Amino acid sequence: MARQLDYHTLREIFDRFRADRPDPKGELEHVNAFTLLVAVVLSAQATDAGVNRATRPLFAKIDTPEAMLDLGEEGLVGHIKSIGLYRNKARNVIKLSRLLVEEYGGAVPNSRAALQSLPGVGRKTANVVLNMWWGYPAQAVDTHIFRVANRTGIAPGKDVTAVERAIEDQVPVDFQRNAHHWLILHGRYVCTARKPKCATCVIRDLCDYEEKNL
């Protein structure tokens, strides 16, 4: 685990991230809060690209919890068989759709506690929805962000909760809204697990990673 970088270094890092990707976006395709929630639930242990291939035709027809309940579990399975753990995920999507209809009038709630009360929705999923749909500076720490945060010294922590807290505590507030997107995209395309692309990395001179692949 790298040491925690100082404030001025963090500002420079995120200034460079912003210059490189001024308007970073999550890569899960969706048309509203409900389809975003479903997409994030389906994305557990799956790639965004794989989820998008499965959900593109699904969301063209099914974009409300009521419509999802009408489709039913077996109907949903037919759309998402290419996604890992599809049976369990289909069950959770139907259950959460029913709860949304019964408890929230068919709307997706915008509190973390309410979101986490839904089947298949953990803290990371809730944070993605809060960030991407409502613009709340929630930090959804996945494997990419955990790796980048610890490898670089941006927000080191022993577990995902510690990294989430470190991002919230250490990253300057004007970068908080997009920090999650910059870090995940950096981890997905530059600071990769096996062969990080250090030679083309915009923060290579600021990063504390000792085994740079230059």
Image (cartoon, rainbow, N blue to C red):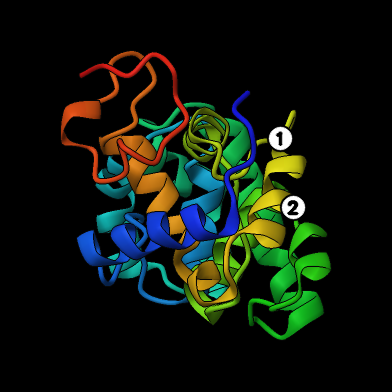
Residue 157 or residue 121, whichever sits in front:
157
Looking at the image, tell me whether mark 1 or mark 2 is earlier in sequence order.
1
Is the C-beta separation of discs 1 and 2 under 8 Å? Answer: yes
Residue at 52% over, 79% down: 135
Label 2: which residue? 165
Report whether 43 appears left or right of 88: left
Q: Is residue 42 above or below residue 209?
A: below
Q: Quadrant of residue 5?
A: top right
Image check: 112 left or right of 4? Answer: right
x, y percent for residue 47: 37, 35
Quadrant of the image containing the N terminus: top right
* Depth check, front residue: 77 or 116: 116
The residue pinned by badge 1 equals 157
Residue type at the position of mark 1: Gly
Residue 155: where, in percent of width, then height?
A: 61, 44
Residue depicted at 69% across the width and 78% down the height: 110
Q: Would residue 71 be visible to someone looking at this image? A: no
The C terminus is located in which quarter? top left
User: Mark 1 packing: few (<14 Cα in 10 Å), some, or many (20+)?
Assistant: many
Question: In the image shown, does 99 or 52 lie closer to the viewer?
Answer: 52
Q: Give x and y (percent) for residue 101.
A: 70, 76
Q: Is residue 9 above or below residue 111?
A: above
Q: Nearer the viewer, residue 166 or 132?
A: 166
Can you tell which mark lies on residue 54? Answer: none
Neighbourhood count class around disc 2 (C-alpha, 10 Å): few under 14, some 14–19, many 20 upward: some
Tell me the residue at 50%/28% (across/down): 151
